């Protein structure tokens, strides 16, 4: 089996059955191995993405599960193959893996897939753009052979644009001001300049602290919000916790969070906090003095002078505040730039670094190295000089096509910084802003996270509340407290808490939600509050687990009528579509017919036509955000935290 070279091994066993080698791939990165009855193994075994597996599948059946013959794990450079015991059969969902390629990789995988041949050191001009999806393999990985990293496979990636970013920012700001109200554009970014006021927020009391010494830029979705509303205020004021992005925390209130006010909200489109740095010199090294002087043993430069940074790099290091905590002068240390990749605080600042400089691959690069090679030759190192010249010749490219020009300066963004901008554009989807969720919540809870009702032991409603009461303040109760209140019967009627929160989730459904949620994050019921942040995790549970036909509709697999019917069976306020049956078997005329008509007086609050419109409008929003699977991944990433 040529697994090493990613070859697909297919063996025809008999008609309609084939064995193959695949690799696990699932959006939520959790693939469960099941037994012959399709139940999870006991103990449970989950495979992550990228695991090599052997599979037997029936090509002429509609079975959703294939037989798992084996899987391989690599730990400590040792590969171990796992198989079911004699007499046992393992099964795996047929959409949780991909077949490996059926031939050896030739050229770049992305181009090979599109039937485009490549050769070493030969540029390729595409006759049409190629769409690149998240997780798609772009090219062959190179080896990075620095000390302690021999054999580590890394990818060299450059992100740049020839567009003038300063001009783009100015145009974007003008367009944003014009379109903000007209098109309903919402802020999605938090930018805090140095010298901004910091606050502590405790029990709805706001206290001024010191001012920020660092610059902070972060997607709004990554920042916790707290609303403070005084008795005299009609509306509250929002504050945002920036404590995770501060270097030296103010001494006061370290545990309660450190906040800035809502005046710092902006939009990622405006590139808030972006600083443009311009290259000086030929860019051969990051030091102030030319490379040929730094390597010359006869140079008059002192060690301190050799370690001085180029003005552009010094400005970048100052901007990144690498020595902020030490209150020391900025100096360059080997490995310091690599260490940046490990710090969330530094990664956030990388989003604001844009550098205008020459291409590393420009054809005139050989001339830039002429003095450096001359120093090596003058010191008897002809081989070193020749090796440098050959490497430059191999890497230099003279390419001018469709605006791309290797001899032209460009604006370069740090790849991690670019991820920050992409996170802004893809991380904005809010289910609570969709027409479907708004419609459901408008009748179920009036949009209140503190809504609840009381029922008797026979399940008959007795009270409904939409604001906190002396008895129950839902958003300040723990999961355990809510479950206990749902189980405890009071008085001769057996009154108890029943449906709670903004989605009016009932006891059985709450348990299902907690079980589903445990696949993505660990919850301590004794500590976890049933607050707004927690309740906002629920929409995906309903689409993925409880009312899965909605997800199927968003994916284009079922019609909108089927999704609307599923919603009517979950929420009594939604009308049953025309022609579908209610719980008692009555065929709906499409009016205010509730599915739960077995209880006298029950009526829907809105017809199925309203539900269908909300479903269609929500699907348009989802498609505009990249489709259901993209939105699903955004939602699950927020759940995972």
Image: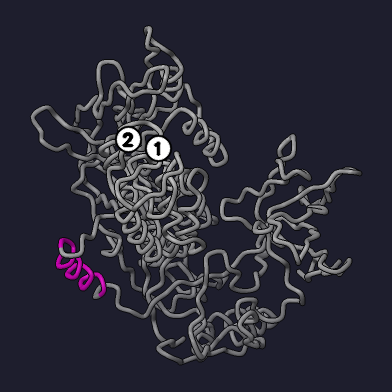
Q: Measured along the vertical axis of the image, is residue 131 above or below residue 81?
A: below
Between residues 363 and 220, which one lies in front from this camera angle? 220
Between residues 305 and 549, which one lies in front from this camera angle? 549
Q: Residue at x 90, y 43 (%)?
A: 87
Instruction: Please state the extent of the stretch shown in magenta in the rendering.
Output: 168-181
Return the mark for residue 509. Answer: none
Secondary structure state at the residue bearing disc 1: loop
Dot 2 corresponds to which residue?
A: 602
- The number of discs equals 2
Q: Is residue 72 visible?
A: yes
Q: Earlier in the sequence, mark 2 or mark 1?
A: 1
Task: Give the quarter of the figure containing the N terminus.
Answer: bottom right
User: Outermost residue toward the front?
Assistant: 586
Q: Badge 1: how crowded within 10 Å, few (<14), some, or many (20+)?
A: many
In the visual, does 88 lie left or right of 629? right
Color style of the picture: one colour
Dot 1 corresponds to which residue?
A: 596
Please check the rendered image and state whether residue 454 is part of the magenta-colored stretch, yes or no: no
Q: CA distance from mark 2 to mark 1?
A: 7 Å
Secondary structure state at the residue bearing disc 2: loop
Tell me where residue 63 appears, x and y as whole percent.
71, 57
Tell me where residue 596 appears, x and y as whole percent.
40, 37
Between residues 527 and 356, which one lies in front from this camera angle? 527
Labels 2 and 1 touching (C-beta < 8 A)? yes
Q: Measured along the vertical axis of the image, is residue 119 above or below residue 640?
A: below
User: Outermost residue toward the right?
Assistant: 86
Q: Is residue 350 visible?
A: no
Between residues 345 and 572, which one lies in front from this camera angle? 572
Tell me where residue 324 appears, x and y as whole percent.
37, 45
In the visual, does 65 lie left or right of 178? right
Q: Main secondary structure of the magenta part?
A: helix
Tell me where residue 362 appears, x and y as whole percent.
49, 85
């Amino acid at each position: 089996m040529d697994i090493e070279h990613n070859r697909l091994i297919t063996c025809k066993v008999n008609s309609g059955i084939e064995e193959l080698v695949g690799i696990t791939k699932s959006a939520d990165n959790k693939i469960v191995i099941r037994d012959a009855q399709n139940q999870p193994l006991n103990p449970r075994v989950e495979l992550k993405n990228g695991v090599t597996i052997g599979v037997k599948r029936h090509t002429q059946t509609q079975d959703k599960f294939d037989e798992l013959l084996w899987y391989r794990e690599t730990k400590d450079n040792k590969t171990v193959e796992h198989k079911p015991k004699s007499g046992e059969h393992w099964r795996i969902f047929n959409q949780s893996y991909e077949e490996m390629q059926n031939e050896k990789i030739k050229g770049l995988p992305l181009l090979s897939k599109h039937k485009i041949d490549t050769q070493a050191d030969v540029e390729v001009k595409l006759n049409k753009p190629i769409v690149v999806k998240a997780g798609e393999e772009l090219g062959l990985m190179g080896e990075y052979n620095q000390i302690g990293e021999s054999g580590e496979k890394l990818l060299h990636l450059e992100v740049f644009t020839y567009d003038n970013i300063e001009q783009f920012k100015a145009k974007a700001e003008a367009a944003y001001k014009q379109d903000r109200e007209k098109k309903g554009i919402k802020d999605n970014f938090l930018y805090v300049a140095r010298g901004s006021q910091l606050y502590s927020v405790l029990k709805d009391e706001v206290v001024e602290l010191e001012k920020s010494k660092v610059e902070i830029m972060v997607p709004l979705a990554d920042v916790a919000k707290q609303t403070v509303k005084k008795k005299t205020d009609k509306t509250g004021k929002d504050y945002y916790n920036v404590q995770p992005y501060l270097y030296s925390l103010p001494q006061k209130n370290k545990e309660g969070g450190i906040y800035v006010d809502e005046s710092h909200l902006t939009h990622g489109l405006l590139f808030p906090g972006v600083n443009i740095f311009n290259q000086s010199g030929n860019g051969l090294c990051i030091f102030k003095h030319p490379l040929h002087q730094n390597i010359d043993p006869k140079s008059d430069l002192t060690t301190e002078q050799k370690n001085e940074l180029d003005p552009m790099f010094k400005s970048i290091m100052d901007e990144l505040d690498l020595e902020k905590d030490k209150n020391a002068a900025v100096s360059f240390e080997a490995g310091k730039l690599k260490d940046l990749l490990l710090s969330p605080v530094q990664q956030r600042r990388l989003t604001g670094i844009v550098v205008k400089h020459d291409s590393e691959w420009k054809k005139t690069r050989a001339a830039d190295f002429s003095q450096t090679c001359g120093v090596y030759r003058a010191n008897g190192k002809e081989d070193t000089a020749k090796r440098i010249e050959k490497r430059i010749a191999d890497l230099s490219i003279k390419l001018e096509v469709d605006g791309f020009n290797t001899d032209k300066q460009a604006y370069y963004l740090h790849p991690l910084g670019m991820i920050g901008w992409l996170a802004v554009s893809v991380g904005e989807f809010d289910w609570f802003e969709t027409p479907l969720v708004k419609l459901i919540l408008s009748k179920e809870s009036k949009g209140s996270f503190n809504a609840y009702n009381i029922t008797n032991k026979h399940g008959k409603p007795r009270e409904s509340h939409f604001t906190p009461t002396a008895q129950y303040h839902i958003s300040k109760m723990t999961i355990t407290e809510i479950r206990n209140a749902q189980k405890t019967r009071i008085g001769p009627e057996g009154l108890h808490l029943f449906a709670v929160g903004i989605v009016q989730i009932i006891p059985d459904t709450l348990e299902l939600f907690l079980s589903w949620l445990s696949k993505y994050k660990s919850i301590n019921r004794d500590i976890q509050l049933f607050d707004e942040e927690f309740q906002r995790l629920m929409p995906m549970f309903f689409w993925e687990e409880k009312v899965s036909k909605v997800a199927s509709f968003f994916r284009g697999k079922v019609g909108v009528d089927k999704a609307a019917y599923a919603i009517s069976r979950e929420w009594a306020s939604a009308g049953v579509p025309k022609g579908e049956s209610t719980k008692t078997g009555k065929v709906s005329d499409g009016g205010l017919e509730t599915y739960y008509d077995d209880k006298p007086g029950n009526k829907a609050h809105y017809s199925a036509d309203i539900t269908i419109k909300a479903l269609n409008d929500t699907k348009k929003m989802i498609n505009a955000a990249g489709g259901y699977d993209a939105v699903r991944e955004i939602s699950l990433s927020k759940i995972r935290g």
